[in-house]
Amino acid sequence: MIVTALQKQKKHLTGLLLDNGEEVLLDNDICVNYAIKPEMQISEEELKRLKYESEYARAKSRALWYLDRADRTEKTMYEKLVTAGFDKRASAAVVGRFVEVGLIDDRRFAENFAEKCRDGNISKREGIRKMLQKGVPYDIANEVFSETEVDEEEQIRAVIEKKYARKLEQENGVQRVYAALVRKGFSFSAVRNALKKYSEELEYSEEDYV
């Protein structure tokens, strides 16, 4: 095949017009690096390689753009690239390379996420569920949460004070708050103890005004 013309396209792409009527879009840098120009002869194998390298370069650029905005796991980065329309093989290669150089690290992501869950008073069970949704393998999620020091009863107390204090005063309030906290992933015993302590402290505080 012979390149008959080059046409600049949007989004850093150049269109190669071939003598067989085909148009192939390649990354601008790929065209520059290989000095592609009109009248240049190119084989099917060479064109296939150029297409892959172009797709890899574009997927890499997009992946860096994603990481600049938020840390990601291997799974979510791969899914983002494929959903954006990039070749699966090139997307997998980009993710693999980013893992190799440390730009993507599922354990680091999990450790940071676990800290956010602790600071946000999110239970271990709920935190692990959220991590799995973000592509963290279960063994890493469970291990990281096990290593994160958390006072579950203090977390529950903070949630009560922020969201459920007034509900406790309502009819059947204790039972409803208990159920809500359990649904958030806190253990039965921790919820029971936290509610008991909170109620006792509240009653003691009210006695000061009697």
Image: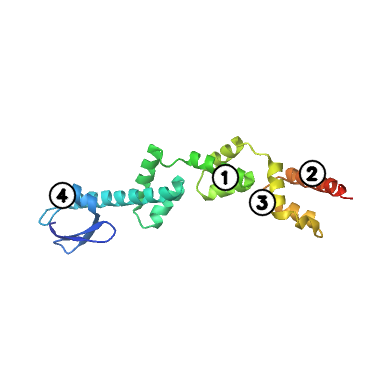
Circle 1 residue = 116
Of residue 159 and residue 18, the one placed in the foreground of this image is: 159
Determine the secondary structure under disc 3: loop
Q: Where is residue 19 in the image (x, y as percent from the top left)?
A: 13, 61
Mark-to-mark CA distance, 1 and 4: 49 Å
Mark-to-mark CA distance, 2 and 4: 74 Å
Circle 2 residue = 197
Q: Which residue is drawn at 87% across and 48% down?
A: 207
Q: Where is residue 46 in the image (x, y as percent from the top left)?
A: 19, 49
Q: Position of residue 119 (x, y in %)?
A: 61, 44
Other residues around mark 3 within 10 Å, as few (<14) / some (14–19) / many (≥20): some
Other residues around mark 1 within 10 Å, as few (<14) / some (14–19) / many (≥20): few
Mark in front: 3 vs 1: 1
Q: Position of residue 101 (x, y in %)?
A: 38, 37
Which comes before the other along the chain, label 4 or label 3?
4
Circle 3 residue = 184
Q: What residue type is labelled 1?
A: Lys
Most extreme residue toward the front is 209
User: Mark 3 and mark 4 in contact (Cβ < 8 Å)?
Assistant: no
Mark-to-mark CA distance, 2 and 3: 19 Å
Which comes before the other along the chain, label 1 or label 2?
1
Q: What residue type is labelled 3?
A: Lys
Mark-to-mark CA distance, 4 and 3: 59 Å
Other residues around mark 4 within 10 Å, as few (<14) / some (14–19) / many (≥20): few
Q: Residue at x 55, y 39 (%)?
A: 139
Which comes before the other along the chain, label 2 or label 3?
3
Mark in front: 2 vs 3: 2
Of residue 167 and residue 105, the one placed in the foreground of this image is: 167
